[in-house]
Image (cartoon, rainbow, N blue to C red):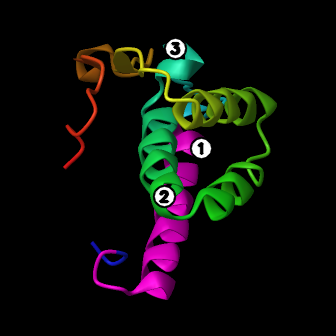
Amino acid sequence: MAREMGEVDLAVKLFRSGMEEADKLRSDDSDTDDPNLALKAWWPSISAYWRLVQAASRFFPRTALEQVREIKDPEILLLLEVRLANNALGARAEESITMFQKTSSPRSSWSEFRLPETPGSEK
């Protein structure tokens, strides 16, 4: 919305702030004392990173890629780079799966499945 209102600096600031929040989610997902046991590609933090990067790449592709490259985890970096490349080539996104499963709190485990996005559905 900030970008559509012509507030480019605010849009970039909000994107970077969102990426910092996704970093916090990643810390929780990768907590060595109680890690998320779901497949890493399905972690809530990965979903947050991707949704932020996907939205930012529509208006600021270079900024989005630069922010992705600041991620220190090579698996997450690769996953997001591949998704960005697929997105830039017009490849249809696969269904989205987000999963949270920890041994310390099995009752708070959850999963979310989304169908592939169709062009124009992001509005």
The residue identified by callout 2 is 56
Q: Is residue 72 above or below residue 75?
A: below
**Residue 92 relative to residue 72: left or right:** left
Q: Position of residue 66 (x, y in %)?
A: 73, 58
The residue identified by callout 3 is 37
> CA gap, disc 2 to disc 3?
29 Å
User: Where, by quadrant of the figure, is residue 16 drawn?
Assistant: bottom right
How many numbered marks have been drawn onto this rendered protein structure?
3
For the residue labelled by badge 3, is the local secondary structure a helix, a strand or a loop?
A: loop
Residue visible at 48% across and 63% down in the picture: 59
Residue visible at 61% across and 34% down in the picture: 31
> CA gap, disc 1 to disc 3?
13 Å
Front residue of 96/86: it is: 86
Q: Is residue 23 above or below residue 86?
A: below
The residue identified by callout 1 is 27
Q: Position of residue 30 (x, y in %)?
A: 61, 32
For the residue labelled by badge 2, is the local secondary structure a helix, a strand or a loop?
A: helix
Q: Position of residue 46 (x, y in %)?
A: 51, 34
Write down the region rendered in magenta: 4-28
Q: Amino acid at mark 3?
A: Leu
- Magenta part, dominant SS: helix
Q: Position of residue 6 (x, y in %)?
A: 36, 86
For the residue labelled by badge 1, is the local secondary structure a helix, a strand or a loop?
A: helix
